[in-house]
Amino acid sequence: MSKIVKLFMILLLLTACYKKDNSETLVITDSDGNEIVYKIELAQTKDELTTGMMNRTELDADAGMLFDLSPYTNVPTAMWMKDTPLALDMLFIDQDGTVYWIYENAEPNSEKLIVAPYAANAVLEINAGDVKAKDIKIGDTVKYKLFDKDKPVQNTDESKTQNQNSDNADKK
């Protein structure tokens, strides 16, 4: 076998064994302009959305999973922790990238439904305690390719704001 063919086969084998990094960068900007950077995985397919962080025993610091729920903005958003041994904080995000509701310290392995006040465009799951430690709040802005600042927000009404404030107070 020629040296070139052998080299090609070795490179092909190494490429097949190389673990691809599917992480992307997402930035949360607070009201003071401070930026919090996360490396995230994007859950988009039905299988990815269904499985999420199930059966994972660790999540790197400053890492998370973003659930793209944009095709489902006309149905209520509900998350759960079934088969998820990690405690997580969840940020519920409007289509313009605004964090509109936060659920902290979701109980590991719980089948309790975590139901947002209205349908989210996306949900970001991060390590439990990050919301408090990084001072993430309702109204912070998420910069990522899913969020279009030029689109009008679908879910705008006065009761939404009242619901998110009272619901969030219950969670803290």
Image: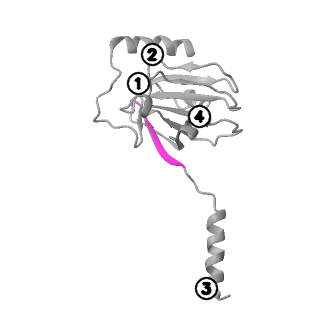
Q: Is residue 29 visible?
A: yes
Residue 17 is left or right of residue 162, and the answer is right
Q: Residue at x 41, y 27 (%)?
A: 73
Amino acid type shown at disc 2: Gln
Q: Are marks 3 and 4 in contact (CB under 8 Å)?
A: no
In this rendering, the count of numbered labels is: 4
Magenta includes 133? no
The amino acid type, in three-letter code, at marker 1 is: Asn
**Residue ID at (33%, 37%):** 148
Segment tinted magenta in the rendering: 23-31
**Picture disc at residue 50:** 4
Q: Earlier in the sequence, mark 2 or mark 4?
A: 4
Q: Position of residue 100 (x, y in %)?
A: 43, 23
Report the residue marked by disc 3.
4
What's the residue type where badge 3 is placed?
A: Ile
Colour scheme in use: one colour
Secondary-structure class at tag 3: helix
Q: Nearer the viewer, residue 99 or 140?
A: 99
Q: Which mark lies nearer to you, 3 or 1?
A: 1
Q: Which residue is mark 2?
A: 164
Does dot 1 land on a helix, a strand or a loop?
A: loop
Q: Earlier in the sequence, mark 3 or mark 4?
A: 3
